[in-house]
Image (cartoon, rainbow, N blue to C red):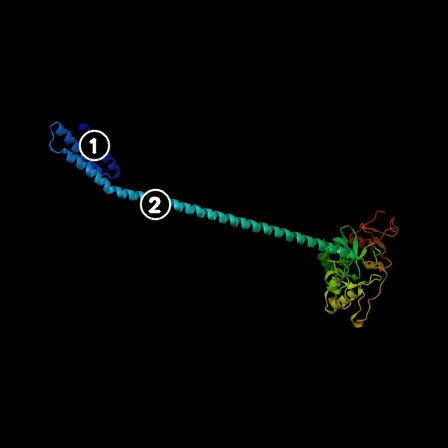
Amino acid sequence: MKIIKWILIILAFLIILSSLIITPLAWIGLLIFGFGVYQSVQKDKGKGKFSKPGLIVALGFVFSFIMAMVFVEPVSETSTKLQEEKTNNETIEKELAGQQEKEKLEQEKKEKELAEQKAAAELKAKQEAEAKAKAENEAKKQQEELATNLGLETVTISRVVDGDTVELSDRRKIRLVGVNTPESTTRTEEYGKEASNYTTDKLEGKQVWIQKDVSDTDRYNRDLRIIWLAIPSDDMNEDEIRSKMFNADLVINGYAEPSTYPPDVKYSEYFVKFAREARENNTGLWAFGENGTTKGDLDTKETKSPNTNPKPAQPAEEPKNQATSNAGCNIKGNQSGIYHVPGGAYYEVTKAEEMFCSPEEAEAAGYRASKR
């Protein structure tokens, strides 16, 4: 019986210990339980003070058990809450992960759309650039064909000699056909410097197109040419002549007078018409008088009429230096910047670029004396 008794006591003790896990109040039951066991042992020795210590043991056990039962439900609820919180947290995490995944997919979709838009824009820009280049090449080809059909040559102006004479990058000198600007080199005429400066501003360093009328060169071996600032679609259209031909530009703006030398008369009527307009408005050199400031063949106001033809001149263009009209002006200046006097070793074979009346005049124009 004692063995069974102690087995029960041990079991009860273990149950009470487990109750301590649930609630600290089970310690009270454990103390009561322990006190009862102690009194039971004392009773067995004949020293016990209580006649029934088993009741004390039972009371301690029952108290611990009741406390465990009272507090076990809240613990269970707490566990449930914790589980719910855990579940809620997991749900929130899943939702957050889902939201992040959704945002990631949307971002990837947006980036893909942007990449496609960029690729489409680049493709469009490339196609437009290719189309533009193709159109420019076709336009350039058409312009080249048009220039060829009109007999135009593309050149670059390297230097302006004076208002109506220029030098090309290949060293050729060009004398503008059908017009004459006031002198500004070996001698100076009114409005000559202005004409030279105007031509410099318009032509120097520029690419232009030159066109031959009939004559190729003048007596000074200068190429006689029309200068076009742009290729005309029709070289006999007045609007094109006014806006694109530099020879006409000089006349329209009063920097030159018409100067007609057959057979180069293709544009002479236009030059006369433009000069009359400039004179009527006192433009440029016409502000100095009805006859201008240099040699030209425009009719005077008194004789002007719609049927007046340009004054015929010499069969070739006269030299810029008017000193050639005087018998004593026989000093030749060549393209190399050297002047030759009569009797010199190379005088007879020299092609004169300009004629001078004296060595001083030639040297003032920048020429140096021949050594022979």
- Residue in view at x 63 percent, y 51 percent: 126
Q: Quadrant of residue 236?
A: bottom right
- Residue in view at x 47 percent, y 48 percent: 103
Q: Is residue 254 visible?
A: no
Tell me where residue 220 appears, x and y as whole percent. Answer: 83, 55
Tell me where residue 34 appears, x and y as whole percent. Answer: 18, 33
- State the mark number for residue 61: none
Q: Nearer the viewer, residue 80 or 337?
A: 80
The residue under label 1 is: 8
**Which one is closest to the eye, mark 1 or mark 2?**
1
- State the mark number for residue 84: 2
Q: Nearer the viewer, residue 93 or 312?
A: 93
Query: Horizontally, is 268 left or right of 122 in the view?
Result: right
Q: Earlier in the sequence, mark 1 or mark 2?
A: 1
Q: Quadrant of residue 160?
A: bottom right
Query: Label 1's element?
Result: helix
Tell me where residue 291 appears, x and y as whole percent. Answer: 78, 67
Q: Nearer the viewer, residue 2 or 289?
A: 2
Q: Give neighbour class at mark 2: few <14, some 14-19, many 20+ (Cα, 10 Å).
A: few
Q: Is residue 83 above or below residue 208?
A: above
Q: Is residue 40 visible?
A: yes
Tell me where residue 112 appears, x and y as whole percent. Answer: 54, 48
Query: Label 2's element?
Result: helix
For the N terminus, the image quarter is top left
- Residue in view at x 15 percent, y 29 percent: 41
* Disc 1 + disc 2, Cβ < 8 Å: no
Q: Is residue 79 above or below residue 271?
A: above
Q: What type is the residue that disc 1 sits on?
A: Leu
Q: Is residue 291 above or below residue 343?
A: below
Q: Using the numbered discs, state the Cα–Cα distance from disc 1 to disc 2 in whole angstroms.
A: 39 Å
Q: What type is the residue that disc 2 sits on?
A: Glu
